Image: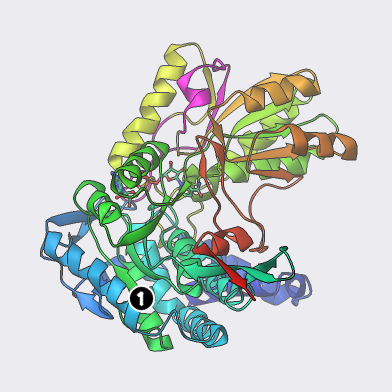
Amino acid sequence: MAAAFALILEDYRADFPAQLQHMPRAIHILLSACMKESRAVDVFNPDLIALPQGSNFIGGRRVIGRGQAIPVRRPSDGRVYADLDSVDDAQLGEAVEDAQRAYKSSGWAQTDPRGRMRVLRRWADLIEADMETLAPLEALGSTRMIHEIRAWDVSYTAETVRFFAEWADKIGGEVAATTPDKLGLTIHEPYGVVAAIAPWNLPLVMAAWKIAPAIAAGNSIVLKPSEMTPFSIVRLAELAIEAGLPAGIFNIVQGDGRSVGDPLVRRPEVAKVTFTGSTATGAAIMTACAQTGPKPVTLELGGKSPQIIFADAGLDKASAIVARAITLNAGQVCVAGSRLLVQEGVADQVIDCIMTAFAAHKAGPTWASDSTLGPIISEGQLDRIDGIVQRAVADGAQVLTGGSRATAPQDGSFFLPTLLQNAAQHSEAVQGEIFGPVLTVQTFTDEMEAYALANDSAYGLAAGVHTSDLTRALRATRTLEAGTVWVNRYGRSNDFILPTGGFKQSGIGKDLGREAYVANLKTKVALIEF
Ligand code: NAD
């Protein structure tokens, strides 16, 4: 009963935050009391989630992989909950050939653009309607918490599909300026088979950024999800078929990078590759594309993003934003704001606020209603984070809070939100992507020093600036070497039109926006003489 009330209150809070203020006080007190009483409620029982047979999706149906079985572990409690059935070489070949056959003969690329749009819109509606299947499936073996997935991931995935559906009849080509006795045309055409490789950190959303623009533009796709979070995306493919997408346009092959990802991008039928993951893997994929094409490649890679707080900023708000930007998904977000640069004079106040925000977190499994800090994806990654922090401390940095594993009710992989002061600018902790809830803090005296520290990085994915000075905000957006600069906020909005992608070692090309759609089209020229 208490649990039910607690869930009602959570849903009500998410949907009607304004109305909540006017809820009769007695009801509010009753529900809040229930909420407290029910702190340890499991929103779903992970042991009761049944995985359908066959984790690959080839020719419009689930296919059982004949390749190497990979044990898949739940980061929330360490339990191995499934063996992933990878494809073998022959099945990988079948998937790619099937995608090519579907591209050439299913009629998808020839369907009138608004017809493609209608199928994609139906698909998006089915994704949203499938919340109660998709959300636990996504939370089960990932680092995403069930309440975050319900509030954001599933609807954001559906909206990504809708956004790219709308481009299907918007980009056709151009008439070129030429002499009056000729007509010069640029014509956009799909590439054919696009290979997409996705990471584990936001499994549905990251895959949707690749799949949706490629399919909307008329391509077929072969997706390899991360071997650590392979299952939820297969449900998305089933829904695509239900929406009317021809079989073979969206295929999924499972397996690790070495035995499936690398041979996939090397296949001769693959005309374009789109990848999200680490910078090292991105470089290996680019090499493979150069050796076997060359073929175009979009790379969304790692980051080490600065967040700059100037003394004139609204300090409470800025501190709360900074704290959230490194604890969201336990810091396992490409744009995690992992370097705090704060102006001297306000540093103590900002640090106090951030430490208070960090202390309020409760580490717990993705399926518990009261968890606010999710797990780290693997024990290996947890050891890596711990190692970076311990080496920083050995080199003279101070841990202001956190700095070690977090204890949680179950035996999962958790790391405490950590604030690290006095790590040297050229140290591993300040320069390397940690991909955990670890924030370094450095101070600066003047504006140009802040930009110099911020730009002194091999990465250039995102940056945050907090100031009340408009001129400075504009100067910062021009000066910072990052694909996205957020001012007085940090993180994405629902503006899918804004492309995302990094400079320097953070990548090549963009996801989202018009750019991501156009990147799935090649340009042909026609010159007609009268
Ligand atoms: P990863 O590079 O280890 O793996 C990503 C994917 O590549 C997985 O599916 C993996 O199986 C596959 N892979 C590995 N080796 C391969 C190879 N040689 N050929 C083909 N495929 C191969 O990355 P990860 O640990 O899954 O994800 C975390 C990383 O992703 C972080 O660096 C993060 O910053 C980055 N990321 C970037 C963005 C962005 O938009 N820039 C978004 C999310 C994550």
Question: Could you tell me the amino acid type at mark 1?
Answer: Tyr
Question: Measured along the vertical axis of the image, is residue 209 above or below residue 467?
Answer: below
x%, y% of residue 359? 57, 39
Image coordinates of residue 416 in percent, x first then y, are 46, 37
* Horizontal relation, residue 403 to residue 251: left or right: right
Q: Who is closer to the viewer here, 52 or 324? A: 52
Residue under the point 65% across and 74% down:
15
Image position, residue 11 (x, y; %): 59, 73
Give whichever of 40, 344 is nearer the camera.
Answer: 344
- From this view, report whether residue 511 is shown above or below residue 119: above
> Is 96 positioned to the left or the right of 15 in the image?
left
Can see residue 58? yes
Q: Quadrant of the C terminus?
A: bottom right
Instruction: Decide if residue 34 is on the left or right side of residue 406.
Output: right
Q: Is residue 220 magenta?
A: no
Residue 406: say if magenta. yes
Residue annotated with mark 1: 103
Residue at (63% x, 43% y) in the render: 483
Residue 376 x %, y %: 38, 45
10 Å crowding of disc 1: few (<14), some (14-19), many (20+): many
Residue name at image x 39 percent, y 35 percent = 405
Q: Which span of residues is magenta-colored?
A: 404-433
Overall secondary structure of the magenta section: loop
